[in-house]
Image (tube, rainbow, N blue to C red):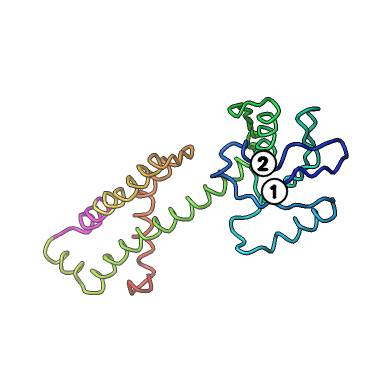
Amino acid sequence: MSTNPVNMTGDGFDVTGAELFANMPNATSAFEVTYVDIENYTDFYNAVYEARNDAPLYPYRYGSYQIYQANKKSNLYNIVNYLNVTSQDVTALYPQYIYQSILRVATGDPDFVFDVTSTPYPIYQKFKDIEEAAGAYDFVFMSAIALALIPCVMVQFILNERELALKHQQLLSGMSLSGYWASNVIFDVLMAYVPILLIIMLTFVFNKHYQGIWVLFMLYPPAIVPFTYVTSFLFKSDINA
């Protein structure tokens, strides 16, 4: 902005950049303005270009106002607005600030309000589907790691009892083989439902409602326990299992 009424059009200029700035909304808190007294376009362009290297670099320069005609008598206001489009909000808000300032100066009403309404386009369904799929992959990955630890714990106890002959000792003490496996199956299935129910509860807490996922979770313990017991006979060491 220019602090002097510099006329670049020859039609008169009786409004200064400082006056326009003073009438901007929240001018003293929302803006840190640098004034330049330049009388031709080329020098203004060069000044704006070189200002990108001014230290400190923060806060960033989000725009510049080139005022080349501002006349209260004829109500002619011509301003070029340069924008830093790295900000998504600048395109709508930065011009609106100067528009409101011009209307306040032109009408002589410092309380004149000219609001801007931003109505973004809705997010495309394709993007929503991609985001939901990405979230599903994370959910599956984390759940798979948790569920994979369940058979690891079960097979350890089974092979430990076999290696230490604890199973044989129990059979010699009068326990039936069917009773041994039945008690282990019941206990392991019930214990497996503890993390399963916790996972199902968290899916509702964090709004991860995948259709039918709770059915798969509920079927997991009675499926994984017999599978673990059968495959345990393929190993002699709990570490290898």
Q: CA distance from mark 1 to mark 2?
A: 7 Å
Residue 10 found in image quarter:
top right
Q: Position of residue 71 (x, y in %)?
A: 78, 33
Query: Which residues fall within the magenta stretch?
Result: 175-186
Q: Please, what is the dominant secondary structure of the magenta stretch?
A: helix
The residue located at (80%, 31%) in the rendering is 76
Say which element carries label 2: helix
Residue 237: where, in percent of width, then height?
Answer: 33, 74
Q: Is residue 170 magenta?
A: no
Any part of residue 231 in sight: yes
User: How busy is the neighbourhood of tag 2: few (under 14 within 10 Å), some, or many (20 plus)?
Assistant: some
Q: Disc 1 designates what residue?
A: 63
Q: Position of residue 15 (x, y in %)?
A: 73, 37
Circle 2 residue: 94
Dot 1 or dot 2, earlier in sequence? 1
Image coords of residue 155 (percent x, y): 32, 64
Q: Residue at 82% of width from left, 50% of height from top? A: 39
Among the 4 quarters of the image, the one containing residue 92:
top right
Amino acid type at circle 2 is: Tyr
Judged left or right of residue 69, residue 194 is left
